[in-house]
Amino acid sequence: MKVLVIGANGNTATRVIKRLAKSKHDPVAMIRNPSHRAKFDKLGVATVLADLEYPIDHAVQGCDAIIFAAGSGGKTGKDKTVLIDHIGAIRSIVAAQVHDVRRYIMLSSINNDINSQSRIAHYHRAKAHADNHLVESDLDHTIVCPGGLTDQKGTGLVSLKAELQGSGLTSRENLAAAIVACLDCDNSVGKSFSLLDGDTPLADALRAL
Ligand SMILES: NC(=O)c1ccc[n+]([C@@H]2O[C@H](COP(=O)([O-])OP(=O)(O)OC[C@H]3O[C@@H](n4cnc5c(N)ncnc54)[C@H](OP(=O)(O)O)[C@@H]3O)[C@@H](O)[C@H]2O)c1
């Protein structure tokens, strides 16, 4: 499958891209800064320039799947959280529908809730709105909700639950492995799940979804 990775230069997405580059799939890295191109050229991965604050149809067209791994990050204002994590995500979902990109995998977060009162409620609300939009779309979606992200080595051992509220940590390496595995796991279609580091082999956890 030709897989568009949105937010490709990010910490998790770069790990996703590296895995995809070694797989049977054909990744395309969506970046917003041309200076990031060299990194993907070295990996032999195609790039497309696009920004979630503007139309991204040219990036989506011709793809078979989308992995959304972008985010405004903790250092921007709440306005950017709305523009990227909420509206930008919905823009990509609508573009997928318009251009008949059937498979869509969303990197989300645990504790999403449109009525969140958390310390980062603006973020949890934005992500929840985008996730709800995806669930209500006709796309073959999977929503992966990690805990606090770490750069710990990936163990391949996870805890995967339908319950999306909770706390815990998720290594970006385990998260990237799960996201890529979902592409080849029909059992993950139409599902939302939390993903924490745990003690179950990833393949077994996905099979038991
Ligand atoms: N941090 C946590 O503990 C945590 C916990 C749960 C869930 N999450 C979710 O996991 C996601 C990935 O985390 P991460 O640490 O891997 O992310 P990251 O390194 O911050 O990467 C985010 C990427 O999004 C891109 N981006 C931002 N605005 C964009 C725009 N307007 N158009 C296109 N791309 C844009 C950035 O592009 P540039 O490289 O050009 O800046 C960056 O590459 C987060 O966004 C968050 O939603 C995070």
Image (cartoon, rainbow, N blue to C red):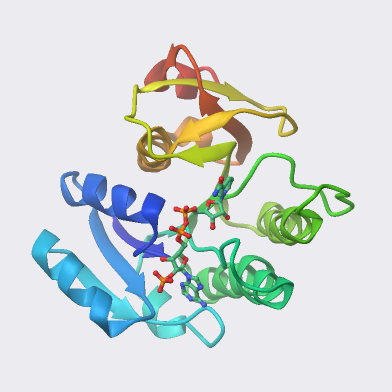
Q: Position of residue 109 (x, y in %)?
A: 63, 45
Could you tell me which quadrant the C terminus lies in? top right
Q: Would you identify the image quadrant in which residue 131 lies?
A: bottom right
Q: Quadrant of residue 91?
A: bottom right
Residue at point 74%, 46% (across, down): 112
Answer left or right for 150 relative to 92.
Answer: left
Pick whichever, 184 or 100, lies toward us: 184
Residue at image x 64%, y 69%?
90
Position of the N terminus, as image quadrant, is bottom left
Counting the numbered discs, the total is: 0
Residue with the most extreme front position: 75
Q: Is residue 167 above or below residue 31?
A: above
Q: Indicate whether 75 appears above or below 109.
A: below
Q: Position of residue 188 (x, y in %)?
A: 51, 35
Question: From the viewer's perspective, is residue 206 above or below residue 179?
Answer: above
Q: In the image shown, does 171 or 61 lie closer to the viewer?
A: 171
Outermost residue, top side: 199
Q: Quadrant of residue 47?
A: bottom left
- Furthest residue toward bottom: 54
Classify 206 as above or below 128.
above
Residue at x 73%, y 56% (from the top left corner): 136
In the picture provided, is 23 more to the left or to the right than 85? Answer: left
Counting from the top left corner in percent of width and height, residue 99 is at 47, 75
- The residue under the point 34% across, 22% down is 155
